Amino acid sequence: MSYAPTAPHDTQHDGHTPSGLLRWLTTTNHKDIGTMYLLFSLLMFFVGGAMILAVRAELFQPGLQLMQPEFFNQLIGVHALVMIFAALMPAATGFANWQIPLMIGAPDMALPRINNLGFWLLPPAALLLTLPFLLAVFGVGDGAVATGWTLYAPLSVQGGLGVDFAILALHIFGISSILGSINIIVTIFNLRAPGMTMMKLPIFCWGWLITAFMLIATIPVLAGAITMLLTDRHFGTHFFNAGGGGDPILFQHLFWFFGHPEVYILLLPLWGLMPHVLATFSRKPIYGYKAQVYAFIAIGVLSVIVWAHHIFTAGLPVPALLYFMYSTMAISVPLAVLFFCWIATMWRGAMSFETPMLFAQGFIVLFGVAGLTGLVLADVAADAQYHHSYFVVAHFHYALFAGGIMGVMTGVYYWLPKWTGHMIDERLGKLHFWLTIVSFNLAFMPQFFVGLAGMPRRIPDYALQFAEFNAISTVGAFILGFSQLLFAYNVWKCMRGGEKAAGRAWEGADGLEWELASPPPHHSWETPPAIR
Amino acid sequence: METTAGFTRPQPHMRFAGAFAALLAPAAALADYTWNFPPPVTPVARETLQIHNEFMIIIGVLFTVVFAIMIYSMVKHRKSLGHAPARFSGPTGAVQWFWVLVPFAILLFIDFVLMGIPAWRAVVEMEDTKTKADMVLKITGMQWKWQYEYPESDIRFVSALSTPREQIANQEAKGEHYLLEVDNEVVLPVGRKVRILLTATDVIHTWWVPQFGVKRDAIPGFLRETWVRIEAPGVYRGQCAELCGKDHGFMPVVVRAVPEPEFAAWVESKKGEQTATAAGAERTWSKDELLAKGKEVYEAQCAVCHQPDGKGLPPAFPALSGSRIVTGPLLGMNGRLAKDGHVDRVLNGKEGTAMQAFRNTLSDVDLAAVITYERNALGNATGDLIQPAQIKALRREAP
């Protein structure tokens, strides 16, 4: 493929760039858009976090203290939707926007206007999702979606207008994701610097490329399922109503056909990030580049054929149970490849432990807990006990907080010097790391035990034997939540100033993005670099 | 005898202190905590616990070995120790390839042999609902209670949370079995294989008793099945495990397992109770009798949504006080059921909402009483009443 980069005539736009709000509304620059994605993600991370702190406060002791069950159910579901669709996914897209052009030697993303649209769809979607809370205050409707993020029919058919708002919000989030994915695929396929073959593509870009394909494969299935839900609610169809010849379990199949890959969609970009960070701070090349790329592809393929392990208790036939059990266990193989390569990348390096490295190593250990508990969850018989219990809640928070959020923080700390031109405050960063890792375990480790003891998830009140673990978990959650303010402060501080960062901000960093100045010029690579 | 799952239950005022003591001295608090599944009382639960324990050891070893290697590397291969970085980026030579492939061979063995084979056996046993069942129990989940049916003995009753609302609202001290107690326990014989059929009337619920190792969804419009053979007498407690709306957290399961003769006696007494209730439908009830009975039924069945004062929680749960339906005509022309009238709504429910068809769960007396109560209390005063015998006749009419 050939591509002629635009002549550098508008490098500084000769002062024609709009300023103020209009600049951010109309920008087509990948860095501006990346920044907006990341700041939006940070904001929504605190919104989703505040919701769950309210939930944890209610769960501090048995009995209903702060809220009624209806409101509790709204908080848990919207917390999940906000964290997944408005915090984690935009953060990863923000990384892609900032980094892919820098890493592949391109001036910008291939489809800059689509890029702008992709971002500006997010705020209205987030607003739609949370607006019913406010409407309820004014006496309109009975609050936000109260079905949990899974929106299982027929509960979601029965629900109030919050469900409709959530359906529309998810549609818009989905369109945004698909636009972002198309842009990333087109950029990676067409804008690589001459000589950068696919097997020389930075591994972060590989992670995102597979993610983008997974999004395009699965978001339409979610869109289909929630559209069917919408017509069941308002237009007299019976897709999920046995009384009309439908099947409630159909919704669960469709949902998890999207929902399981979604987990990897959230994590794959971060698995792509890890090798870069580990290699940088071990001062060693990435170990097993090809093996990791093949593992990504294998995970992408496996992710769409294992969905029913989320519904083992729904009463599937034995052959289906066995198939989904063994195919799920098979995912441990490509994941073990990744763990092996991560550790081998550090092995016999010359490690130093700056904040991004600490987060990367914390990520690996805690994500290891998620992976191993995931392996036992695959077992149908044991799953009958774990399923719908706090064991699962702990498991997926090890995957999505330790794997997801801490992965995002690894990336932010790692690339922030590149983006802002300032080094981060290491002392604050390390404090943030230790507070996060200790309080995270304090919050979620007890949930494994309370789940084994028999506490179901999504309950606003619980029997007395679960009280101690819940109290500990709440204390941990509050320390965890408030520690994240340090992160926001550190980011803000780094944006405002600090020690100047060199182009190669980290001593051992390798890759095209580190060849550019920090911060990089407006049109990152005006002439594509030659790849050796 | 009552088994309580080996849970240690400290006094409420100790709990607070306990939580913080645990933060300070994990080892000292160890004894007070449940770290694993409650003691199993069925073959499936025993096998599940055994598998779980084996798997926890396997993943514990994997975790320790993998991260010991990583931590060793973090300690030894530091820049601050002057360790010079190696340059390798993949295995070279047959020996290295061998060491790279060995972990994956071990992993495949763990996945598909060490874990895979016991898992297969357990699944097949768990799903063996079709053979050698001694009796059938049918469970119907509904917002937010369980209905139990014994088809062989023609017994049917509803089991709902019996914890007083005052305890939940922290106005009273919480009892020993807070949130895990019901008005009608389901009784099963020890040592018999019970085939359990599950369904639901409104949304999906999940029937779960941790000590049975059984958790199965109850899906509206479909039958699902599972089985238990309880090995020891006792009271076993569990909860609904699938988010099913407002009172999902208040939908416990309580099973009392008793020896065979005791079970037979229970069946007889339950049958007698039901016959007495049915006989009640034949006689004419006075208004005061109906109102007294109706208040009881209302508080057990209706107050959860429509609230004890009948004001409801609109818009999801409409008020009954001054409601157009409740204060409207009792019956249609010629004493027939009026579509969307009060009796129709109570008998047949409203599709797509939490308002369920109470014809399935309440007796003629209960229905007549609660309808009469709603029309003459909660701020309503229509003055009319309906007799159990009328309900009995109306049941046969199409909705």
Image: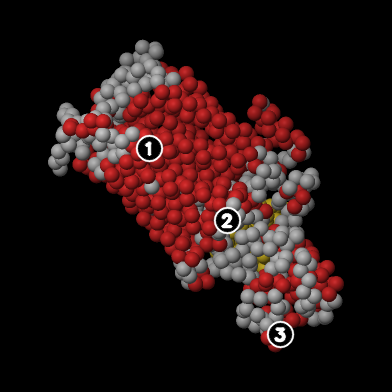
Residue B398 position (above or below residue B355): below
> Percent x, y for residue A370?
48, 39
The residue closer to the viewer here, B111 or B241, is B241
- The tag on residue A21 is 1
Which residue in the protein does label 2 denote?
Answer: A140
The structure residue drawn at horizontal position 71% and vertical position 50%, both measured from the top left corner, is B179
Q: Which amino acid does label 1 sit on?
A: Leu
* Residue at mark 2 shares a chain with residue at mark 3: no
Which residue in the protein does label 3 denote?
Answer: B335
Residue A58 position (above or below residue A359): below
The structure residue drawn at horizontal position 31% and vertical position 19%, both measured from the top left corner, is A502
The answer to whether residue A416 is left or right of residue B178 is left
Residue A449 position (above or below residue B398): above
The answer to whether residue B304 is left or right of residue A339 is right
Q: Which amino acid does label 2 sit on?
A: Val
Colouring scheme applied when the structure was drawn:
secondary structure
Query: Residue A360 occupies which quadrant of the picture?
Result: top left
Chain to which the residue tagged by mark 2 belongs: A
